[in-house]
Image (spheres, rainbow, N blue to C red):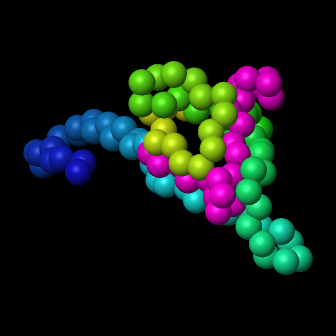
Amino acid sequence: SLGQKKVNSGAKEDFTVENQKQTGNLLITKKDKNSEKRLKGFSFKIKDSKGKYIIIKNDSGKKQSKITGTIHVGSMETTDNKNEATEFITNDNGEIQIYQ
């Protein structure tokens, strides 16, 4: 909700609206290209739109070096260093689930 602001006739009023953070859940399924078989234990790292690697922190604020299967994200940060990034590893169903 943006709220309300009353503007009297002939008057000028400034109104600032702050951008709201967009969040969502992510499900990644890794499959073999030819057989469509889901791949267990496949690992990868994720980059953002600026090419920086993602570091996931859990609800307690602890950086997660490896995540297998499912995680609820407390927060994220980015890094240029691939070695600092969180490694995601698919579970027995070939999935990674990330909840915010």
Left or right, 32 with reference to 61: right
Q: Nearer the viewer, residue 65 or 80?
A: 65
Specify the segment rendered in magenta. 79-100
- Report if residue 46 is visible in the image: no
Q: Residue furthest bottom?
A: 35
* Number of disc labels: 0
Q: Which of 25 and 93 is in front in this view?
A: 93
> Is 32 one of the magenta-colored residues?
no
- Judge whether 13 appears above or below 81 on screen: below
Q: Which residue lies furthest to the front in this view?
A: 92
> Is 95 one of the magenta-colored residues?
yes
- Residue 51: x and y in percent read 77, 38
Residue occupying image coordinates x 49% and y 54%: 25
- Residue 94: x and y in percent read 69, 60
Q: Quadrant of residue 67?
A: top right
Residue occupying image coordinates x 53% and y 29%: 57
Left or right, 12 with reference to 73: left
Left or right, 10 with reference to 86: left
- Judge whether 24 appears above or below 33 on screen: above
Locate the C terminus by quadrant.
top left
- Judge whether 63 appears above or below 94 on screen: above
Q: Nearer the viewer, residue 87 or 41?
A: 41
Q: In which quarter of the image is residue 83?
A: top right
- Residue 96: x and y in percent read 62, 53
